[in-house]
Structures are given as C-alpha cells and as structure tokens.
Image (spheres, helix red, strand yellow):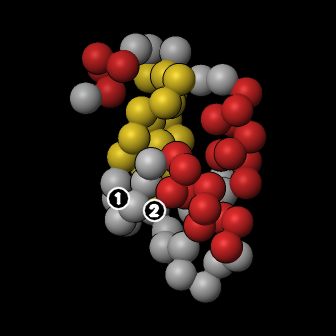
C-alpha cells in the first residue's frame, strides 16, 4: 500500500517545523504530489502537517502515476 500526498495549503506563515516536514516529504509548490510507502515514519510526518495536505491511499505505486 502507498500514500499519494498532495500539498493543498501554503506553508507561508506556518512554524518552521511544518515547513521542514513538508520539504522532507518532497513537496514544494502547491498541488505538488508525491508517493510514499505507508509506514509509521511517514504517518507521523503527515500527522504534523495534516491541515496542509490531502492524503489518498493507493493499492500500488503504479496506480498512483
């Protein structure tokens, strides 16, 4: 199982830690999308920035593209 993560809100005016987490996930501009495996480390990062991203579960990484 994989997660498709989309940045839907800007990090401008947010704490530095949230901006750093968004960059660590590989997101940059609004509406950028990345695919990550579903594991506890990624889930923890998403919990930190849940108000800035949209997360969708996909069966495998080939579906996500």
In the rendered image, the vertical position of residue 10 relative to residue 51, given as above or below: below
Where does residue 64 sit, x and y in percent of width and height?
Answer: 32, 27
Residue drawn at 65 percent across, 78 percent down: 14
User: For residue 61, what is the image quadrant?
Assistant: top left
**Residue 4 appears left or right of 42:** left
Q: Secondary structure at mark 2?
A: loop
Q: Which residue is mark 2?
A: 8
Q: Which badge, 2 or 1, is on the more N-terminal residue? A: 2
In the rendered image, the vertical position of residue 54 relative to residue 44, given as above or below: below
Classed neighbour count for the residue bearing mark 2: other residues with Cα under 10 Å, few (<14), some (14–19), many (≥20): some
Residue drawn at 68 percent across, 45 percent down: 45
**Residue 36 appears left or right of 43:** left
Q: Secondary structure at mark 1?
A: loop
Residue drawn at 49 percent across, 69 percent down: 9
In the rendered image, the vertical position of residue 26 relative to residue 60, given as above or below: below
Residue drawn at 73 percent across, 48 percent down: 47
User: For residue 21, what is the image quadrant?
Assistant: bottom right
Cβ–Cβ under 8 Å for marks 2 and 1: yes
Classed neighbour count for the residue bearing mark 1: other residues with Cα under 10 Å, few (<14), some (14–19), many (≥20): some
Where does residue 65 sit, x and y in percent of width and height?
Answer: 25, 29
């Amino acid at each position: 199982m994989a997660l498709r993560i989309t940045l839907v809100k800007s990090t401008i005016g947010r704490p530095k830690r949230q901006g750093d987490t968004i960059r660590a996930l590989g997101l940059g501009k609004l509406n950028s999308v990345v695919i990550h495996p579903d594991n506890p480390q990624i889930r923890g990062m998403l919990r930190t920035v849940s108000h800035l991203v949209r997360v969708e579960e996909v069966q495998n990484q080939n579906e996500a593209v």
